[in-house]
Structure formats: C-alpha cells, structure tokens
Amino acid sequence: MDNQKAVNAVKTVPFWTVLVVAIVALAIGWAIGRFFFGSAGSANGKITLKENELDTTIGTLTYKNKTEKITAREAIEAATSLKAAKNKDGVYTVPGADKVLAVARNKILAQACDEAKINVTDEDIQQYAEKTLKTKDLKQIASKYSMTEEQVKKLIGQSARVKKLYNSVVKTADVQAPAAPNKPKDGNNDAATEEYGKYIIGLLGDEWDANKGTWAKTDGKYYKALKDQKFTATSASYAQAQAAYYVAYQEYSSKMGDANAKWSKFVNERLSQASIQISTLVS
C-alpha cells in the first residue's frame, strides 16, 4: 500500500468517531437555542482552504455570555489529522456544519466538566484508551490514525472527561451488557448441559436459592420467564439459557435507556442555552 492509499484508509475511520461510538450516550440530538448560517469575514463562499488559511473562522459559539471562534483547523483536528485531511492537490475541504456543531458541543461539554471540577490523569487516559481502543499505547494509536501523540492524548482525555461527567450525571456504575450463551456446536438447542445450567444460575442472582436448588423468589423477572422450565445448576438447555439471556438483556436495555434519557436531558439543557453561527458551504 503506497502512502496516499494509507492516508485514504485513515480517512475512512475518523479517530473521534471511534471515541464517540465508544460512548453511545454522546450520540444525542442537538437542541441549539439559536442557529444561523453565514458570517462576514469567514469562509463564506469557499469549499477548500490552503494551509495558510486553516485558521479561518468557520463558526462562532456563544454560550453563557462568552463568544468563541471555531476555526477550520480546530474542526479538522477534532476528528482527524491535518495530514490525513489534506486532499491530493494539497488543499483542505472546509469542514462541514456537522463538524462545526461537534466542536461546539465538545466545548460546551468541556465547560460542564470544568464546572463539575472533573479532570483526568495520565492513568485515566491510558485506562480509557485500553477500554475503548483496545490499547493504551498512545504512540501506536497516533500511528494508526496518522495523528500526533499529543493530539491523541488530548482527544482521549476529552472523551474520558465526558465519560466521567456522564457517570456523575446518571449516578450509576457502568452498566454492562450481559454475555449471550454460546451456541451449541451440534445445533441441538434442547440438549441439557452443565454449561447452560451454570449460565442461567449466574444470571438469576438473589432470585435463586443455591442451597435448596430452587427459586428464592416468585415475584421476579426471571421467575416469570422461567417458572415453567425445569433446569438445575448443572443441567439446562441452550433454549432455556436464551430465555434467561433475553430477560437480562431487557433489564440492561431498560437501565441504559433511563441513563441515556437523563444524560440527554442534562446535555440538551446546556445546548439550548447556546447560539452558533456557521459559515461553510459543506453539509
């Protein structure tokens, strides 16, 4: 693969997109108080910029009586590197409105982190990188996404701060999705095995009396779903395990829905106080 192909490959998966996907709660709708297009002395009328024009203002954010300019350079580097963003003719496509909005949103969330006195250490950044990108080697990450190590550290740090803010707002520990039971190799969903028995008991929690080998509660969600099923800690079928998994996943989805609704309300309350003016012809 030549250098140009390598750069194009990097462009297909923007770094910030990877981090946002890692925090599903950030994928929320905008509730901007006021929203305008066009501004004098900006990138109006242009769809590309030369390198010496990257500090051109392409957006203006006003939030809590403070106005900040958003430059093309800032919008590009919030998602990828200048190297990866450069076109083959040596110019840069003016970032679209969605990129400007993303920068504005991140600025508002950063201020919310400041107000909540939320900070991250180098260890926090490494742990977050390990969890979301499967490695804490910032140099390796920078190389993969054609970015500088400093830029990678900054972006991961921003995302880690927002994750801490999210946890403080929803006031709950990270909700983990339940692992699905392994499919039977022979395709027999009704054959009883110890593996599925252990799997089910592991999900039942205090609804199951391990000493007596029977239900401890008859008013729980698992009892409602499995009360007519015969199984033990050492014998259950894949079909029964699937039924238990469905209950666990429904509970997980409900908790995530409640948490994300609370987070969306928190963020949108702040976004509604902002006004943003955008000057870009790119959608």
Image (tube, rainbow, N blue to C red):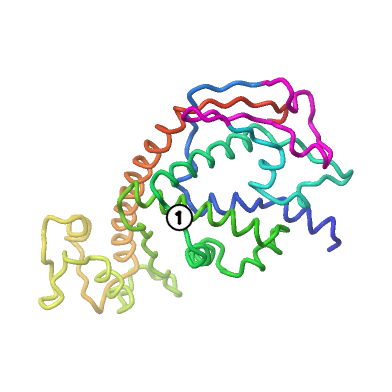
* Residue 60: % across, % down: 61, 29
> Residue 133 location in percent, x, y?
56, 63
Q: Identify which amino acid the numbered label 1 is placed on.
A: Asn
Residue ID at (66%, 52%): 13
Q: Position of residue 76 (x, y in %)?
A: 69, 44
Tell me the crowding category of disc 1: few under 14, some 14 to 19, or many 20 or more residues within 10 angstroms, Cα based: some
Residue drawn 35% across and 45% down? 257
Placement of 247 over or under 110, stated as above or below: below
Helix, strand or loop at mark 1: loop
Q: Is residue 57 magenta?
A: yes
Q: Does 145 sit left or right of 206 as displayed?
A: right
Q: Residue 210: horizontal and vertical position, in percent?
A: 15, 75
Q: Quadrant of residue 61?
A: top right
Q: Nearer the viewer, residue 17 or 239?
A: 17
Q: Is residue 62 inside the magenta stretch?
A: yes
Q: Nearer the viewer, residue 240 or 116?
A: 116
Which residue: 45% across, 27% down? Answer: 273
Instruction: Find the residue positioned furthest to the right.
Output: 89
**Residue 130, placed above or below residue 46:** below
In the rendered image, which quarter contains the N terminus?
bottom right
Q: Which residues are magenta?
A: 38-67
Q: Is residue 30 above or below residue 25?
A: above
Q: Which residue is mark 1?
A: 119
The C terminus: image quadrant: top right
